[in-house]
Image: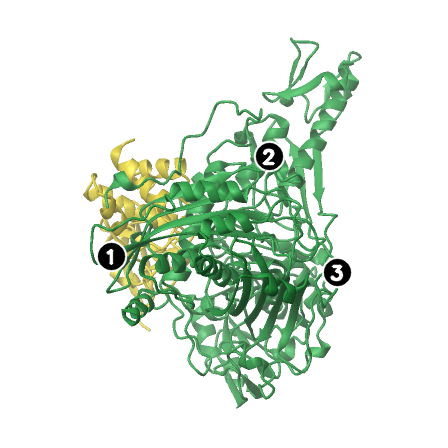
Chain colours: A yellow, B green
Amino acid sequence: MKKHEISFTLNGEKVSLEVAPNDVLLDVLRGRLGIKSPKVGCDRGDCGTCTVLMNGRTMRSCLALAVEADGAEIVTLEGANTRKWTQRLQKKFHEKNAFQCGFCAPGVILSATELLEKDPRPSAHDIKEAIAGNLCRCTGYEPIVAAIDEAAKGK
Amino acid sequence: MDLQKLKTRTGKAPKAAKAADGLKVVGASVPRVDGWEKIKGAAKYTDDLEFGPGLLYAALVESPFAHARIKSVDISAAERTRGVVKVVTGRNFTHKFGLYMNDRYIFAKDVVRFVGEQVAAVVATDPKTALAAAALVKVEYEELPAVMDPVKALEKDSPLVHPDLKDYSHVPWFFPKPGTNIAHWRKIRKGDLEKGFREADLVMEDTYTVPRYAHCAIEPHAAVGLYDASGRLTMWTSSQSPFTQRHVFAETLKSFGLGHKDVRVISTYIGGGFGGKAGVTMEIIAAALAIAVPGRPVKLLWNRAQEFYNTYQRLGVTAKIKMGATKDGRITALDFKLHWDAGAYVEYGANVVNAAGLSASGPYKIDNLSVDSMCTYTNLPPCGAYRGFGYSEFLFGLESHITRMAQKLGVDPVAFRKKSAISEGDVLPYGAHMNPNGIREAIEKVEKEIKWGVKEKSRDPNKAIGKAVVCFWKSPAMPPNASSSAFLKFNEDGSINILVSGMEIGQGLLTVMAQIAGEVLAMPVSKIRVETPDTDRNPYEWQTVGSHVTWGCGNAVKRAALEAKERILDLVQRVHCLDKSTLYLEDECVKCRTKPGFALPFRDFVINGIEAEDHTFKGGPIMGSGVFMPEFASAISNPETGQGGHPNVHYTTGSAGIILEVDRETGKMKIRKVALAVDCGKAINPDLVRGQIVGGLLQGFATVLYEDMRYNDKGRLLNPNFSDYKIPTAMDMPDEVVPLIVEVPQPDGPFGARGVGEHTMIPCAPLIANAVADALGVRIKSMPVTKEKVALAARAAR
């Protein structure tokens, strides 16, 4: 299969590499670029644990081909750790034990980051809707929703 | 709904004030020690570990049939594929394995017994090549008649799933019936059943059914194995049970020269377990493949579909109840027959059946009791541990039935439960006595919280509101000699490292172990590091299952800390000539009651000792070790009556209540409020207990409202993904969740603690079924209680 040379910004740094046309972005991030916060959970866009930000919007990196990242700005939780809303969210997630096994946490925090960057005053419904694509089997979501709410309100 | 309604009482600020019981670290909601790592995305799970470019990948060849004889396996085309390193089949590994019953091979040898069973595996240099080559393996099958239903499996002409059952080795407390599909039959016979029914004012019989469920941990199973030139097998696994895995790997692969000392299991963080990563499932395949490709690491990952059909699932059950009770709310007799669909292999699932059989009375005093808990082989995927370990399943029928009985007798269902609830000292189904418990306090807290007895009306005339209160109990289901151990080591700066092999599976074990040691040694959690295990470095733990590690592993850590404390006090007594009985630990120092100015910081002596007057040094590194085994437990009893042993160490009890709004037309249900009170003996970390309650409740409600594994008549799972097997999202949260903690101390628990992890999902099914009945007057007797079923039943009743 003909390889494609792609370049994109990953967590603020420029990367260039050759990929096959059917290489999945998630696999390239994890397998070739050492980015491990997006996880493989279902490989079909159901669980949200592979969530990354592409040009500021959340996307399922298991459903994107690596070639689609060409020219884009990709941010994973490794890179989002410096964003204002991400940091506020992480502080609240820690305070409120808004995670248990932690496997879904990177995806959830990125979805919440996208929400608060767009709308810092979300309703409870907005919060739930924003993370409805991120499955969590441990927490029952309550502490997650409360953490996002408190991060938004600056409590 | 708006945010004001988000009243869940989680996430309270840590309590800094000294508690009434004098405890400083235990009982405080300290933040989790694994917190920042996880929320920064830095926590490493098995698939995140790097093994370099030499890493090999495996793909499986799986059975398309529920039951078939393997006539031939042709691996030649796969072997010829470029990038393929090895192809293995059942011929390469001929030893059976199992946790409690050795009933399966690593790869099916002559017969496949469920759709998806592994027949062969391909190891290749990359995952795509492995998958493509696996498709080239040609397997010729001769299809055999299959059985999918646990009741039909008992019929005389049913196909036998394991004709060689008589030859299988198993633990002495299992009672298989060779020549049938019964892998284990746990019987309980207590009192005089017929006399009990004669004494009853009402005798009622019915049948309740529960389908299979999937754990749906978000992290799929993952395992990497490396068999090196020194004859050592190292396994990195996503596991709740590293030591049990080490044992099973060593036993199953001993013909390759492996002993226990040669097998090392390293377990990183795991992305959810819920019982699904207990024991051994796919990891044994990775271990076998590592042996097959010596010197090279090989990785096996389950995809989401395999996660559904080839790890063990929660058992389905058909439960036949006959109960007698009096008008004053006393259960006079219970005859309970549980027909479990345990699947093709029951090496772990048979113990679920056993545990449920021992405890099927529920948390009630029932003098006349008969239980038949039958573990039945079927040609569906194997079943095993799932949070609740059989109790959710039998409680659906039992708690549904109790409410119906109470109502027919004209007794308030909550008053009925208070009357019949078990008390400390009552005789348990197997003859031992009940531990101290706060079940009545739990019931009272819950009924107050949901305003039991106050009928509520929805503002929407199309909707009705129902309420329910149910009780639950559960014991850890462990072999009688399941033990825990701990090492504790001081460092130069006075900090400590604790080594245990209890797993952090999200419940907060690492934090709780740090709190227990911190309490004994007067140290803050910030000075204590506890990490996930490596069986070479960390001492033995049986498994992280059964909600037993706070209790078992916690006792081991407490003993290790007490031993270190003794060493500290002995040393200070010896060098400073202070009487040991006057010494105590406070603020990371040794202090003396009779010498107020004396304060010797740990960091000054815990490694380098104390300098004596003659300038010699005394002491040395301070360490502690602790071991805990429940020495009073015994699994041996009369097989016909179940009487005589002490199989269960204790029970955790509790109660839950619900306010449910139901749409009369569509059957759609909305949980307005749910309250759950659990007697955890002592909440080492109240916030973590509340986390277990809130999370467990939603997982429980999911099994009632949404989830259901559907098979076709050929035994193929129809919904092995999250699109077709719906687990709850944030949109499905109850409006209000009230976690309530009861603390009646467990005499042999660390600071009085007992387990709480599984219990919180157990009461959910009867809560919903009873609340639906209260709202609409219709009774659903099969799980899940979907809106469709409710709507159809409501329509039929009109």
Marks 1, 2 in one chain: yes
Q: Are marks 3 and 1 in contact (CB under 8 Å)?
A: no
Frontmost residue, B552 versus B416: B416
How far apart are the two marked residues, 2 and 3, measured between alpha carbons?
Answer: 33 Å
Q: Do the residues labelled 1 and 2 touch (CB within 8 Å)?
A: no
Q: Residue at horizontal 60%, vertical 71%?
A: B375
Q: Is mark 2 on a helix, strand or loop?
A: helix
Name the residue type under label 2.
Ile
> Can residue B651 be seen in the rendering of this structure?
yes
Residue A19: image location, x then y, percent: 33, 64
Marks 3 and 1, how far apart at CA: 53 Å
Quick check: B134 above or below B448? below
Are the numbered discs 2 and 3 placed on the same chain, yes or no?
yes
**Disc 3: host chain:** B
Out of A56 and B447, give the one closest to the viewer.
Answer: B447
Judging from the image, what secondary structure is the residue with disc 3 in? Answer: loop
Disc 1 to disc 2, C-alpha distance: 49 Å
Query: Quadrant location of residue B783?
Result: bottom left
Which is more foreground, mark 2 or mark 3?
A: 3
Q: What residue type is labelled 1?
A: Lys
In the rendered image, which residue does mark 3 sit on? B636
Instruction: Please identify, in this view, whether the residue under mark 3 or under mark 1 is nearer the observer.
Output: 1
- Pick the residue in front: B595 or B302: B595
Query: Residue B516's mark?
Result: 2
Crowding at dot 1, Cα within 10 Å, few <14 / some 14-19 / many 20+, comes out as: many
Q: Which residue is drawn at 69% across and 36% down?
A: B559
Residue B349: quarter of image: bottom right
Q: Mark 1 = which residue?
A: B463
Q: Mark 2 lies on which chain?
A: B
Compared across the picture, whether B699 is left or right of B748 comes to: left
Q: Where is residue B400 in the image (x, y as percent from the top left)?
A: 46, 60
Residue A123 lies in what quarter of the image? top left
